[in-house]
Amino acid sequence: MSRARADEEEYWHSSKFRAFTFDDEDDELSQLKESKRAVNSLRDIVDDDDDDLEKVSWSGEPVGSISWSIKETASSSSSSLEGRDTSLQKGSSSYAALPKQVSSYSLSSLFKGRNRLPSLPSLSDAFSDTGVKNYAPELRRPRAEYKDYSNDWSPRDTVRRMQRGKVCSLERFRSLQDKMVLLDEAVAGHDGNVITAVLIFLKRTLRREVLFRELEVRQVALCHLIHFLKETGEQKLLLDLLRFLDRTEEVALSQYREHLNIQDVEKKREFLKGCIGLPFSAEDISHIQDHYTLLERQIIIETNDRHLAMAGQSEIFRKYPRKASILNMPLVTTLFYSCFYHYTEAEGTFSSPTNLKKTFKIPDKQYVLTALAARAKLRAWEDVDALLTTKNWLGYTKKKAPIGFHRVVEILQRNNAPVQVLQEYVRLVEDVETRLNLATKYKCHDVVIDTYRDLKDRIQLMAYKCKVERGSAEEEKINSLLSNMQIRWKN
């Protein structure tokens, strides 16, 4: 006690002010050193045995709270300061300035939670740089913000949240009744994405038999699931569902659709052959049979033509080399190929166009349109003429076009047919206005002149005279008609 009393007497007789000298140092390290010395002196003065005694410094500040805080700070930095203060002077101009704020806490109250002056600033405010700082405890987030992670949502609320794009866990719906209520709410919401999400959850958590039985009485959800399985390619589950529903035709069509995933031609042919025995409708079974026959025919044609092209024995393959394989091509493409490369072959061969027409019952319009395009591309005008010429039972020939002569003219012009060929078929267009438009567009002058002559339209003929070349045969023809007195013009 005597040592403590002596230190106390030394503290009260000391002063933090001294006379000015030029050796004063205002260095930060010097201030820290003097702060350490002040802490060491205050540490012995503060007596922790009496927690109820409030000790204050000369300036009226609570000694216990400040010295305790400074002691904690000085002890963490003392190791670094001991190596650096060897070159510093032991004298100091003043003690480090302590904060001026008045604390409402004593050293003992920090641990016992007692606050003597509630209206005064706290201990931490004495060391704040800003002077005033709010140290109120951090409040918990509102309960409403934690509802996104709650497991208490009803099926209806869950569906509404899913419609708004919120993340919801469906695992809390464990019973079959809860799951069905959730599905019914999703269907009632008329949101396809929500319905699909719920169906995926049910597909994962229910046995197939239970799921199929419940969906059988929910047609909207059933249609969604069937469409989803088709899009994702879950063929096995789809077939099981259709068999459960006794939809035999849909089962057959789903199995037939598998041929799209088969790349090897021979395997695809065998697969199609097996599909013929599936329970298709009468209309569908004919299409399956035609598909198998067409693929079989394409394999034969492709094999023969590849051999001819490689051997160089056919002139048409040398002049017009093949650009692609005919395998897996549609029927119309196969017909065009046959009309292009095998037009003159006899009907008994598999590659003959007439054989394809007869085997697959191709309509006359489709056959004429395809054959005309193929022969016009080869500029085989004689074949075009023969294609459009028919003979009646008396032996008389007549031009006939099931697709209409206006379309014949367009196809021929697209393949750069000569004007003489175009004029022959423009004349056969029955509608006068269409005929004049086509003749004017493709510069079939003779057709225009003859049409105006038949119409006895002298004014239009004189107007058209300005459109032909001067001194040409067409101009002479127009002048001859205008000067013909036997024609009774209507204007």
Image (tube, helix red, strand yellow):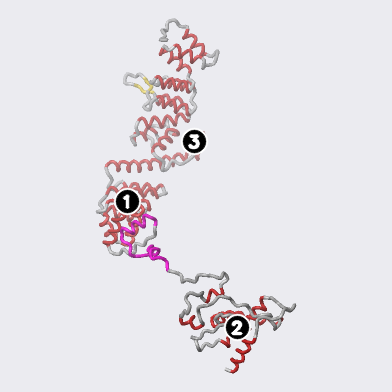
Q: Main secondary structure of the magenta part?
A: helix
Mark 3 lies on a secondary structure that is helix
Taking depth in this image into account, of 210 and 406 the one nearest to the observer is: 210
Q: Residue at x 26, y 50 (%)?
A: 247
Give amino acid for label 2: Val
Q: Which tag is nearer the camera, tag 2 or tag 3?
A: 2
The image position of residue 178, as x and y in percent, is 28, 61
The image position of residue 364, as x and y in percent, is 35, 30
Please tell me whether residue 490 is drawn above or below residue 257 in the rendered image. Answer: above
Q: Is residue 19 left or right of residue 137?
A: right
Q: Which tag is nearer the camera, tag 1 or tag 3?
A: 1
> Is residue 145 within the magenta segment?
yes
Q: Residue at x 58, y 86 (%)?
A: 43
Q: Is residue 386 left or right of residue 107?
A: left
Question: What's the CA distance linking mark 1 and mark 3?
Answer: 60 Å
Give amino acid for label 3: Phe
Q: Is residue 388 left or right of residue 12?
A: left
Of the two numbered discs 2 and 3 on the same chain, state the one appearing first in sequence.
Answer: 2
Q: Residue at x 60, y 77 (%)?
A: 98
Of the two numbered discs 1 and 3 on the same chain, state the one appearing first in sequence.
Answer: 1
Q: Residue furthest top?
A: 485
Mark 2 lies on a secondary structure that is helix
- Does residue 406 appear anywhere in the picture? yes
Q: Residue furthest right?
A: 22
Which residue is label 2 attached to?
39
Mark 1 lies on a secondary structure that is loop
Give amino acid for label 1: His
Which residue is label 1 attached to?
190
- Does residue 33 appear anywhere in the picture? no
